[in-house]
Amino acid sequence: MQAEGERFVWTLLLALAAGAAFFVLRLILAWRLRKRMPAGLVPQGNELYRPDGMSRIVSLIGIDALAKETLGTRRLQATLGLKLLYWGVLVALVVTSVQMKAKVPGIETAIILLVFWLALHTTFYEISYDRDTITLPRWWFGHTTHKWRELEAVTERQGWFLAFHFRGGKVVQAHKYVVGYAALREKAQAVLREV
């Protein structure tokens, strides 16, 4: 009985130490990456304490890759880290569901299908722009195209997204964790300065 109690205490201490080490790793990564990444991508201050702080750091994997450019049109796709994050969560959900011997038509199936949808959406996610227009994806497959000259503002939402505000009250949300984010942000700021 006493051996079980000691084992529980040691397990608890090990879990606390692992949690503390994980948090310190998050702080060190954020501090080191903040110097090298475009503004707004690396979580800062109280954002590091949020549950998605480490997910945002993982989403930075591949952010420095070159954006595809064809005939003056830049095509920005989700970073490798963002894709790995969604597919990793999907695999973890499937493995957990199988180990729990969940019923196939249960709530677990609905959650897995939703995460599968999000993983597919992120895999095929693409923002494209040229000197006159920007094409942004919708949450359901499809795109919406707007003229740059109709852009009124760009704001950040929830640390993960940029919101493009166009004339007529149209707002389109786009992932920040895309290859070529810095160039997209510079283009939007240049357009806003011209207006």
Image: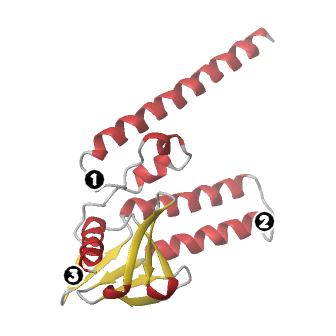
Pointer 2 residue: 107
Kindly check if marks 2 and 1 are in contact, taking CB atoms under 8 A apart as contact.
no
First reached walking from the N terminus: tag 3 or tag 1: 1
Q: Which residue type carries mark 1?
A: Met
- Alpha-carbon distance for marks 3 and 1? 21 Å
Q: Position of residue 2 (x, y in %)?
A: 77, 9
Residue 152 appears at what percent x and percent y?
Answer: 39, 79
Marks 3 & 2, CB-CB < 8 Å contact: no
In the picture, which quadrant includes the C terminus?
Answer: bottom left
Q: Secondary structure at mark 1?
A: loop
- What residue is shown at x 78% (from left), y 65% (from top)? 107
Q: Nearer the viewer, mark 3 or mark 1?
A: 1
Q: Which of the two discs, 3 and 2, sits closer to the camera?
A: 3
The crowd level at tag 1 (other Cα within 10 Å; few <14, some 14-19, many 20+) is some
Judge the density around disc 3: few (<14), some (14-19), many (≥20) Cα neighbours within 10 Å: few
Please state which amino acid type lies under the numbered disc 2: Ile
Q: Are marks 3 and 1 in contact (CB under 8 Å)?
A: no
- Above or below residue 144? Residue 99 is above
**How far across and down, in percent of the image, does residue 186 sit?**
25, 69
Which of the 4 image quadrants contains residue 163? bottom left
- Quarter holding residue 190: bottom left
Q: Which residue is mark 3?
A: 69
Among numbered discs 3 and 2, the one appearing first in the sequence: 3
Q: Which residue is mark 1?
A: 37
Amino acid carrying label 3: it is: Glu
Q: CA distance from mark 3 to mark 2?
A: 42 Å
